[in-house]
Image: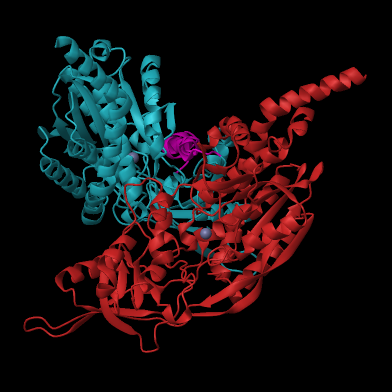
Chain colours: A red, B cyan
Amino acid sequence: MKRIFLLITLLSSINSFSQTDEQVIREIYTQSLTNGKSYEWLDHLSNQIGGRLSGSLNAEKAVAYTKAELEKLGLDKVWLQSVMVPKWVRGAKEFAYIETAPSGFGTKKTTNVNICALGGSIATPAMGLKANIVEVKNFEELEVLGKENIEGKIVFYNRPMQPDVISTFEAYGGCVNQRYMGAVEAAKYGAVGVIVRSMNLRLDDLPHTGSMTYDDLPVNKRIPSAAISTNDAELLSSMLKLDKSLKFYFKQNCKQLDDVLSHNVIGEITGSEFPNEYIIVGGHLDSWDLGDGSHDDGAGVVQSMDVLRLLKESGIKPKRSIRVVLFMNEENGLRGGNKYAEVAKQKGENHIFALESDAGGFTPRGFSFDCNDASFNQILSWKPLFKPYFIHYFERGGSGADVGPLKSSTNVLAGLRPDSQRYFDHHHAANDTFEHVNKRELELGAATMTSLIYLFDKYGVNPISNDEQIKD
Amino acid sequence: MKRIFLLITLLSSINSFSQTDEQVIREIYTQSLTNGKSYEWLDHLSNQIGGRLSGSLNAEKAVAYTKAELEKLGLDKVWLQSVMVPKWVRGAKEFAYIETAPSGFGTKKTTNVNICALGGSIATPAMGLKANIVEVKNFEELEVLGKENIEGKIVFYNRPMQPDVISTFEAYGGCVNQRYMGAVEAAKYGAVGVIVRSMNLRLDDLPHTGSMTYDDLPVNKRIPSAAISTNDAELLSSMLKLDKSLKFYFKQNCKQLDDVLSHNVIGEITGSEFPNEYIIVGGHLDSWDLGDGSHDDGAGVVQSMDVLRLLKESGIKPKRSIRVVLFMNEENGLRGGNKYAEVAKQKGENHIFALESDAGGFTPRGFSFDCNDASFNQILSWKPLFKPYFIHYFERGGSGADVGPLKSSTNVLAGLRPDSQRYFDHHHAANDTFEHVNKRELELGAATMTSLIYLFDKYGVNPISNDEQIKD
Ligand SMILES: [Zn+2]
Ligand SMILES: [Zn+2]
């Protein structure tokens, strides 16, 4: 009798390896594409709430909404994790123009251009700031120009994203130091302001915001910084070629207020066999304020929420504890990601796998993994399971900002990698809106994430769970 | 000296296999992404010309425009190939409503719905057609219902595209017989008209046209056929559940005219070593009339044109003759594809490889190949060259309608396979328009096609060119 029982166990175990994973994953995709909730949730987040800058009323509405929706799912626990976040406000809309001196028999002319303050920037003086402007492509050019050519002027950073780089995130990585460090570098030479070409591969009229830092600059050295649309960057550059002495005027009204209390939103299905091994999936609940944050990162939020729902709908009872974590303040502080990791460490929670979706709601192409060799080999053995869904990208690399602080030598961090070609058309701009998210693409992403979570739950992470592998 | 020369030849040959292909392909992608013409050409085709139904003035404008643009490229030959094409015209916009009988104390009600005539359909009578309507999901249900339940009524085909099929083209394949054969099947049972749910995975208000046939139905048995938007298909279906006796009214004014003369547009770079081996790349110049045909198949047309330009810009001098072929009348007759193959056969032109782009201008994912085993193995050996461009789909399957007639036992036919998730949101509908094509995605497709053409030109096709392989 015992022998027969063992045989059945063995057969069902063989079956669960060679067949069931394929069937389970097929069921997950079917559930997501026919019965997914991600798109409906995103509709609410984007169209009923809107942009969710840290510390704003909308961010708090998003906390309340997603907590209430998670509570409807019958998870084992749903809770808020307190975290203090920075509160920066844009204030009245920015205004800017280029002013050219009279030439020949002409008169002085002004041309309005589209700008937006960078997140974290100070305001201009109340009457705005008008000064000569000097164009550079990088910090090395600043050094060559030196104080004598920069002092009292506005620095215009105009290095475009490289169009022939296939991954647009890589192209972004090659430019974003202009935005993030541009004020610190320009202030060294006495610049009075910074204008940065928007991180956008397309020529259009929309300025793209994003975070910047003053590092340890004393308050009286801080200079206002704004992004200019790519079309207006081209215009400004060509006008500067005709007239180096033109003036640039801008006025912005943003302000850094005191930190305020906010929250990460967390839901959990407690593991049936290994409740102290944690697997998390998440995105960030905050967004910039110009659009409604549909791609960045409403998509990642609703996909992560749907992962736990899809596991339940597909009849999967996790062995390990699976959490959805909706992080607050990824965009301008990473306070939520840091807080989550800090609490996890305090409690001695063993986070074996963390997955983030923060690269847009486009067609999923695969994942990027931050892990050791043994884990990566294990992951590669799962790759064929994803082939029917046109998911082929399994490479080592970065994961996501929010899950980064959970890094250990044995665990696995991963980031969903959707098609990136359109992402920076919308990123941090007024056109990051709901109508640019496709329902099927979003749902395919949620299913792809759920499938990977299912595999990590079932097989654990090498080498920690070697005993588990043998036992199974 | 001779030995040294041989050694150099050998080394450069090794180099050209292990390095140069990678460098050449990198150059092709850089050219397309920084200096591509496809988007500019598509802007003209879509926004200056518009929908290009076979036999229309717009189709002729497209012939003239693309010929003129090809002539600017410095190819060896550019010419038109005459072909007679069917001419079907839509006439005045269609009109339709659902009419429900008075119920309770209510009055008769009409609800307007969005329809469009299917390509090739006859008109309704001038006053329109009003009849009861019977909903079915497939032809088997027609048979079960039989003449007694169908005669004198309109048949409403309402089988949706299956959302859980990952390839939307496969989901389309599972539904399109309703549209193409629906009239023939319904007429057998005495139906007076056909309404077909649009082939669209999304719920929206746009009807999607497409070709239908009367096969060998005598003229007096032919019945008018139209597509209804997915939203209105859902509405009609739910109203029928309440009231089986409701009436459906529609009026359409379309007409099949006599065939007219049109043209395929062809450009050629004549091969330097094997001018009698032909490699062609193409898309179809005609489109449906509701949108501007940007995805179907303006994208394929401009990508194919850019393949020849990109080869030149990348400094490649083809050994074989490379042709771009812009086929006329793919949508409702395939006359252009058939004519091209017929002439090629007459002239004894050896077409070793034909590539079609007719699946939208979205991010390229790879190719589908129709070929023998030897050729497919050769192709698979090239797959690693495409990995840096996230091109991973190399599978056997269909190629394209226009190149199909060129099929032989030794040659290779292929179709570009872009991401398909959004394609049927636009296919054959009024929103197949320029703003839904992304410049980078279009250019990546052109580069991917050019790279494959480059490889086929360099290495030829097995087993025909075995001598060439050894010699090289
Ligand atoms: Zn983000
Ligand atoms: Zn087509």
B166 magenta-colored:
yes
Q: For the magenta stretch, what is the residue range?
A: B165-192
Decide if residue A445 is on the left or right side of residue A308. Answer: left
From the viewer's perspective, is residue A231 above or below residue A442? below
Q: Nearer the viewer, residue B112 or B42?
A: B42
User: Residue at horizontal 75%, vertical 58%?
Assistant: A346
A347 magenta-colored:
no
Q: In this view, which residue lies farthest toward the bottom?
A: A127
Can you give x and y, in whole percent of width and height, for residue B432 in the image?
Answer: 35, 51
Decide if residue A70 is on the left or right side of residue B17. Answer: right
Where's the C terminus of chain B, which quadrant? top left
Please say whether residue A161 is visible from this viewpoint: yes
Can you give x and y, in whole percent of width and height, for residue B155 in the image?
Answer: 50, 43
Can you give x and y, in whole percent of width and height, for residue B35 in the image?
Answer: 23, 48
Decide if residue A287 is on the left or right side of residue A323. Answer: left
Q: Nearer the viewer, residue A394 or A426?
A: A394
Which is the main secondary structure of the residues drawn in magenta? helix
From the viewer's perspective, is residue B114 above or below residue A106? above
From the viewer's perspective, is residue A64 above or below residue A140? below
User: Residue at horizontal 40%, vertical 55%?
Assistant: A172
Q: Would you identify the image quadrant in which residue A340 lies? A: bottom right
Can you give x and y, in whole percent of width and height, for residue A392 in the image?
Answer: 50, 36
